[in-house]
Image (cartoon, rainbow, N blue to C red):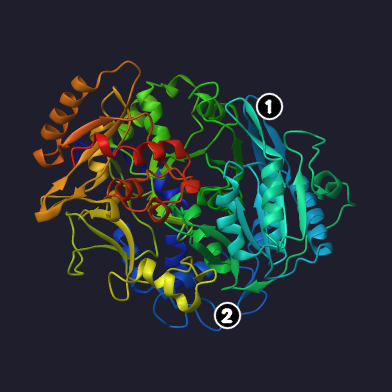
């Protein structure tokens, strides 16, 4: 099907639409509830205007296994006090295991330059049952917290499923996190058991973390037991007491049992970046996550039983938690531990050919890096690849074009955005709609997302605050330890009365597609005009000489401002000609207001552990704020980059 839009890159065929899970759901609504819609926009409007009926329909459509019946769909209270399906009791892991099959593996695991390992459903079930029995022996019961310090390996999924099957609460950090970063998180929730690996693999190196495990276990007084996974070494020699994973797996075979919990009981605790203070301990509900993951994985990723679903992530990013949803859909979960660039950036695309991968998920910076490297994955056999998912940052227009020029004209590119706050995406793939260069396809079902002006009026075709006006089941039930929801309300509900303000700048177009222009707290207010940082990054991504960049705007007295641009240059590139090129590009492609006051070459750009540019901490540091109050260096992926900015004052014309 052709489009009149010159920026259209992909159109779903009629067979693609009618073969989608979303179409099957629409047909079910028509026959079961006599609801019929002419297009996706009408379906979305119904899902947010009559949201109790929408979420109730998902309960019925996905045949939720509940051990007691709900008394309502919601309690009728506004956010953040909304509670869902009260009286219902269920278990997330139970819904995963009802998809078990002898016809396909549960997990496919790849470590750098090692052969792919297949984990059958039988092996997964037996491993979970044995760990479950061990946790029971250790006294773990419903409502207890179990923490993990473990890479993206099959044992991590086994651990989560065992913890969840007991009705206990899961929380995880990636082993590349430093000790203080982990303590800032786990000390808040007082876990009774720590499950840890002896290290992890990255870029051809085996990185031992036994000393970090010892420090974590000794500092958190609530930890009574340590379970150690021998990942790097079959016989690690730690200087602390532990129970070996191998000993646990030597237990006799048994079945997994599932402990029902209340719909609104906590499933896991995730954490905000913690760059500007103590990380928020974001707590989600079992039922809310279950319904949301079923909805998004089926309708917006269109994942089918028997397909291979991959997302490049660590256990420290919420996308690892989201990855569990592929098992809910009956797909095989694909895990990768290591560097995506070892031995080169083609590694993951070669894995997509080998397995094959049907749904390939990654970050926008990874796709941009592949584009800048000039990769041509189309030389591989990627005929099985149905979708490419992108999140973590806005995907530039050039990367959209690169996907269709260098990978496949037929692949469905699903740019999405959501966050740790809800462990899903608010906006993303719509299998009925075209892919337009630079735009996210649309708003997800059940997500009442609008763009607000400063006067709290919904606006189209211009930049506004991303706001959610109706509750969603996967919104946090609370922040752990946050009495009276004080920090919760401060985080989302201070700006607009009764509406969730997410902190992103967004532009929604009349056709429902949209673009996100970066965090509103990092917005460049340039001579009274708001500029999203993503606008500038999109242009810089076109320049081969620029490897990475970060821009901020510093307000000065009398209403003046100073906007420096920091760039990481390719080797042996001189700053002066690049400055001229940058200024010319931004002036011609954007506006004179987009041109920085100074372009400064830096060795690296600081990122959070979850891969976000640290725009706000850099701004605070350059404004002379106390660094201890403005940034937690342990929450930085590359703290030496941040140290450079702290010492940068003398170079600035500020």
* Left or right position of 348 against 14: right
* Left or right position of 250 against 32: right
Residue at 74 percent across and 45 percent down: it is: 102
Provide the secondary structure element on which disc 2 rests: loop
Q: Which residue is at the front of the view, 351 or 411?
A: 351
Q: Residue furthest right?
A: 252
395 w.r.t. 465: above or below: above
Question: What is the x, y in percent for residue 558?
Answer: 9, 55
**How far is mark 2 from mark 1, CA to CA?**
47 Å
Q: Residue furthest front?
A: 650
Q: Quadrant of the N terminus?
A: top left
Residue at 60 percent across and 72 percent down: it is: 265
Question: What is the x, y in percent for residue 462?
Answer: 17, 54
Question: What is the x, y in percent for residue 175?
Answer: 62, 43
Residue that label 1 marks: 115
Q: Quadrant of the C terminus?
A: top left
Tell me which numbered mark, 2 or 1, is placed earlier along the sequence: 2
Residue at 19 percent across and 20 percent down: it is: 577
Question: What is the x, y in percent for residue 634?
Answer: 50, 47
Provide the secondary structure element on which disc 1 rests: loop
- Note whether residue 407 is visible: no
Q: Quadrant of residue 618?
A: top left
Mark closer to the observer (2, 1): 1
Residue that label 2 marks: 70
Contact flag, marks 2 and 1 (Cβ < 8 Å): no
413 w.r.t. 184: above or below: above
Q: Which residue is at the front of the view, 132 or 653?
A: 653
Q: Which residue is at the front of the view, 598 or 168?
A: 598
Q: Residues within 10 Å of mark 2 (few under 14, many from 20)?
A: some
């Amino acid at each position: 099907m052709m489009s009149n839009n010159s920026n259209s890159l992909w159109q779903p065929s009629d067979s693609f639409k009618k073969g989608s899970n979303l179409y099957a759901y629409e047909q079910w609504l028509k026959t079961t509830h006599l609801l019929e819609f002419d297009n996706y926009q009408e379906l979305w409007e119904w899902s947010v205007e009559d949201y109790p009926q929408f979420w109730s329909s998902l309960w019925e459509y996905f045949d939720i296994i509940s051990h007691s019946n709900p008394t309502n769909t919601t309690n009728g209270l506004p956010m953040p006090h909304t509670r869902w399906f009260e009286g219902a009791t269920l278990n997330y892991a139970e819904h995963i295991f009802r998809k078990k099959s002898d016809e396909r593996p549960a997990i496919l695991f790849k470590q750098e330059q090692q052969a792919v390992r297949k984990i059958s459903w039988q092996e997964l079930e037996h491993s979970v049952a044995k760990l479950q029995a061990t946790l029971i022996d250790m006294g773990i019961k419903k409502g207890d917290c179990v923490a993990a310090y473990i890479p993206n390996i099959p044992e991590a999924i086994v651990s989560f499923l065992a913890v969840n099957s007991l009705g206990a609460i899961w929380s995880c950090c990636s082993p590349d996190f430093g000790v203080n970063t982990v303590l800032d998180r786990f000390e808040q929730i007082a876990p009774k058991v720590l499950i840890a690996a002896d290290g992890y693999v990255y870029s051809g190196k085996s990185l031992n973390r036994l000393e970090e495990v010892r420090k974590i276990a000794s500092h958190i007084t609530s930890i009574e037991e340590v379970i150690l996974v021998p990942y790097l070494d079959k016989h690690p020699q730690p200087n602390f007491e532990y129970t070996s994973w191998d000993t646990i797996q030597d237990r006799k075979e048994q079945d997994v049992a599932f402990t029902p919990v209340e719909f609104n009981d906590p499933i896991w605790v995730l954490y905000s970046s913690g760059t500007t203070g103590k990380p928020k301990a974001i707590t989600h509900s079992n039922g809310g996550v279950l319904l949301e993951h079923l909805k998004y994985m089926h309708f917006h990723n269109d994942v089918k039983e028997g397909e291979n679903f991959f997302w490049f992530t660590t256990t420290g990013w919420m996308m690892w938690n989201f990855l569990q949803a592929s098992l809910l859909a009956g797909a095989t979960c694909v895990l990768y531990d290591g560097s995506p660039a070892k031995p080169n950036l083609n590694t993951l695309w070669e894995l997509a050919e080998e397995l094959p991968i049907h749904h390939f998920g990654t970050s926008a910076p990874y796709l941009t890096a592949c584009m800048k490297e000039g990769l041509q994955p189309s030389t591989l056999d990627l005929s099985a690849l149905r979708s490419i998912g992108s999140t973590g940052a806005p995907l530039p227009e050039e990367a959209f074009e690169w996907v269709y020029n260098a990978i496949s004209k037929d692949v469905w590119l699903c740019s999405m955005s959501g966050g740790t706050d809800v462990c899903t995406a608010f906006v993303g793939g719509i299998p009925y709609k075209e892919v337009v260069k630079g735009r996210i396809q649309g708003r997800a079902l059940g997500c009442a997302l609008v763009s607000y002006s400063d006067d709290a009026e919904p606006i189209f075709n211009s930049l506004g605050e991303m706001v959610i006006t109706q509750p969603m089941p996967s919104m946090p039930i609370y922040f752990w330890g946050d009495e009276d929801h004080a920090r919760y309300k401060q985080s989302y509900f201070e700006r607009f009365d009764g509406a969730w303000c997410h902190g992103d700048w967004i532009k929604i177009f009349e056709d429902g597609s949209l673009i996100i222009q970066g965090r509103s707290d990092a917005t460049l207010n340039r001579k009274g005009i708001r500029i999203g940082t993503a606008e500038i990054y999109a242009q810089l991504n076109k320049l081969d000489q620029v490897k990475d960049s970060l821009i901020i705007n510093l307000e000065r007295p009398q209403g003046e401002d100073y906007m420096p641009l920091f760039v990481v240059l390719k080797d042996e590139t001189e700053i002066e000609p690049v400055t001229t090129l940058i200024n010319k590009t931004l002036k011609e492609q954007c506006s004179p207001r987009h041109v920085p006051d100074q372009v400064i070459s830096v060795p690296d750009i600081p990122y959070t552990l979850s891969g976000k540019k640290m725009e706000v901490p850099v701004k605070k540091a350059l404004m002379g704020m106390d660094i201890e109050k403005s940034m937690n260096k342990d929450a930085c992926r590359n703290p030496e980059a941040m140290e450079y900015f702290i010492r940068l004052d003398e170079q600035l014309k500020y």
